[in-house]
Amino acid sequence: MAEAAVSNGGMTRREFLYYIWGASMALFTAELTGLIIWFAIPLFREGEFGGTFTVGADAMPGKNAEPRNFPDGRFWLVNLDTTVDEGSERMYQAEDENEPIVGAAAIYKVCTHLGCIYDWNANNQRFECPCHGSKYRLDGRRVEAPAPRSLDRFELAALDADNQVLAVAELGPDGTYAALPLPEGTTQLQVNTGARLEGASLPLICDLRNNCP
């Protein structure tokens, strides 16, 4: 006979080989799926871009002071307060903003125009991109084009001395993270560079003031 049956009513050799082939394919598929998941979901260590950065609350600049640069995390840390006169040349309430802006924010260090690395211009008291001239207020809102939107922000959380989360930046009406007022007892700030939201396409501040170049 062409096929020898296994005794006691068992499976044939062909059936046995089919089972082995099927099990091998299932194992291969599982391994491939695992590899895809492994590469699709990046794993980042603390203090590595794409992960979280935890800094002491003493790293926070003063109200409306010049931003603090964190090059490893590719973000600026700012402390905003439009209710005070101090630093109003850097942070001020625009004509179309009805509510005060108060709290901390972590701003991505990449221009929203073509991805250049912008810097803080201490002479002009604003962020300026050297590539094509986009300009931004201390909180990242567009002052002058060609940037299509305000600067992107990372999720920011306030922690206490026991690393317990006291507050996390909420989603603002413009679709990005709102400034986070720091609760009493905040000793650390945690920036999640894996959680980035695009800045809003608000009107240019120079258009509001009729002084665009």
Image: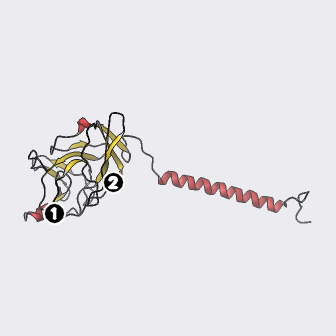
Labelled pair 2, 1 in contact (Cβ < 8 Å): no
Q: Earlier in the sequence, mark 2 or mark 1?
A: 2
- Locate residue 197, reporting x and y percent: 31, 56
**Figure check: 190 above or below 210:** above
Task: Judge from the rendering whether residue 43 lies leftward or rightward of residue 20; answer left or right.
Answer: left
- Tell me the kind of residue under disc 1: Leu
Position in image of residue 181 (x %, y %): 24, 46
Residue 77, quarter of picture: top left
- The answer to whether one can see residue 161 in this image is yes
Between 53 and 6, the one lying in front of the other is 53
Q: Amino acid at mark 2?
A: Arg
Q: Quadrant of residue 27?
A: bottom right
Image: 127 above or below 53: below
Q: Give x and y (percent) for residue 35.
A: 55, 52
Q: Which mark is residue 196?
A: 2
* 191, above or below 197, in the image: above
Q: Residues within 10 Å of mark 1 (few under 14, many from 20)?
A: many
SS type, badge 2: strand
> SS at mark 1?
loop
Where is residue 132 shown, x and y percent of the image?
Answer: 19, 59
The residue shown at (28%, 53%) is: 153
Which residue, given by chain and number where applicable, does mark 1 sit on? 204
| Quarter containing the N terminus | bottom right
Q: Is residue 150 above or below residue 184?
A: below
Mark 2 closeness class: few <14, some 14–19, many ≥20 residues within 10 Å: some
The colouring scheme, among rainbow, by chain, secondary structure or one colour, is secondary structure
Task: Indicate left or right for 170 with 98 as reference.
Answer: right
Closer to the camera, 64 or 103?
Answer: 103
